[in-house]
Image (cartoon, rainbow, N blue to C red):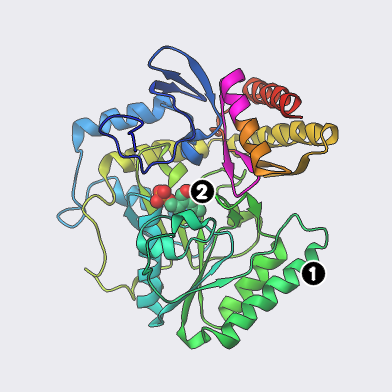
Amino acid sequence: MGRSTPNLSNVWFKVTDLDVATGLGSWITTISGERYLDFTGGIAVTATGHCHPRVVAAIARQAERFIHAQANVYTHDLLQPLAQRLAELSPPGIDTFFFANSGAEIIEAAVKLAKQATGRPNIIVFQGGFHGRTHQAMAMTISKTVYRAGHAPLPSGIFIAPFPDGRAADLESEIDQALAGFDQLLATATAPGETAALVIEPVIGEGGYIPAPTRFLQELSLRSKQHDLLFICDEIQTGFGRTGKMFAIDHYAVEPDVICMAKGIASGFPISALGTKGELDDQWPTGSHGGTYGGNAIGCAAALATIDILSENGFLETVQARGDQLLAGLNDLMAKYPFVAHTRGLGLMVAIDFDTGQRTDDVVEHCLEHSNLITMTAGATTLRFMPPLTVTPEEIDLALTALANALAAVA
Ligand SMILES: Cc1ncc(COP(=O)(O)O)c(C=O)c1O
């Protein structure tokens, strides 16, 4: 098989063939000077847009002070301030933080903490979930077979519970069935005494941008308390303002025991965080987990600058307004084209479903080829939008025009 780029692995799937040179705000520029509107936001990472000047300045300042202050060897002077800032933003009780580099690494950390804190071996995850590509995270990922196929044996002790399809006409009975499935797992497959935690995305991300119904999450929270399971919220994609609140779980009046954070936390600098309660962290034996780069000083600087921007007065309200604008435009298109099956959104986590996967791919391709708009899919028939949270009303309009043209072309 030929290599699409010499010397580079073919293992990365590609959304586009673009070679980029620079990025600013919602835009990227290719090496040949073409500009594209990036509505993937680096897969929900560039919260403050590409190269926000305040994030760039914070990174530059920190690079002159310390690049790698290894966390086992010494404690640099941004680690505690970042942990304190995250504690202020997190749901009640989440006050203690561990740092790593990527989302999957934080999922690994969450599972290790849960096993140590409870003394129990098993984990429950939910249909459609995506938690990463390391072996443990892959065993917990059931959004598509491509992530798992050919990698057996996967770690054991993972049990899959139903996740209600929020698009179903009879949502209440969907929720009842999913809860019954959860109860059945505990009764027949993994006894509560052997189950350390449930791990759930409050909005299924890679698996199709499907928000969990409120009653579902609240009932799961009750069950986790009843059986002493840890409620672990994977906010890797949904966190840091993406849904119009700092964390998606803030929409639900549910208090998790652990939150997994990454992606938007530092506008693109690779840093991730595990937030938990002090009393759970106390059960995590010192030295049983760690990592060479976790809590990187430049990552902490980028995260603090990002959080400052996200915390400004009115920022999250604006995210919600941009999301509403985008969703209203998608609803207009749904009214016009019968092959649009569904639209939905929570903040700037917005999706449109088409009747077939082929139609979805054709729309993505048309937007790219004819309008220089970069989008990507989720699940089988969903096109997802995750622009920077700093996206302007004009940029949303540009994207909607591109989409309208694409839908007319594929009709
Ligand atoms: C919800 C969720 N969890 C975990 C991950 C894995 O994160 P990473 O790719 O940084 O390992 C992702 C990545 O898309 C994600 O969306």
Is residue 396 at all visible to an observer of this figure?
yes
Q: Amino acid at mark 2?
A: Gln
Residue 292 against residue 361 in the figure, above or below: below
Residue 290 against residue 33 in the figure, above or below: below
Q: Residues within 10 Å of mark 1 (few under 14, many from 20)?
A: few
Give coordinates of residue 58: x percent, y percent.
Answer: 33, 31
Give coordinates of residue 386: x percent, y percent.
Answer: 57, 37
Identify the residue at image location x=24%, y=57%.
Answer: 291
Of residues 24 and 43, the one drawn nearer to the viewer in this rendering? 43
Give coordinates of residue 212: x percent, y percent.
Answer: 66, 59
- Taking the magenta stretch, the answer to whether it contains residue 170 is no
Q: Quadrant of the C terminus?
A: top right
User: Which of the numbered marks, if any, corresponds to residue 111?
Assistant: none
User: Which of the numbered marks, if any, corresponds to residue 173?
Assistant: 1
Cα–Cα gap, marks 2 and 1: 28 Å
- Which of the 4 image quarters holds residue 185? bottom right
Residue 188 against residue 369 in the figure, above or below: below
The residue pinned by badge 2 equals 237
Residue 359 as seen in the image, left or right of residue 24 = right
Give coordinates of residue 205: x percent, y percent.
Answer: 57, 50
- Taking the magenta stretch, the answer to whether it contains residue 366 is yes
- The earlier-in-sequence mark between 2 and 1 is 1
Q: Quadrant of the N terminus?
A: top left
* Mark 2 residue's CB less than 8 Å from ligand 1: yes
Is residue 275 at all visible to an observer of this figure?
no
In the image, which residues are magenta? 365-384
Identify the residue at image location x=28%, y=39%.
Answer: 298
Q: Amino acid at mark 1?
A: Ser
Identify the residue at image location x=33%, y=43%.
Answer: 300
Q: Secondary structure at mark 1?
A: helix
* Mark 1 residue's CB less than 8 Å from ligand 1: no
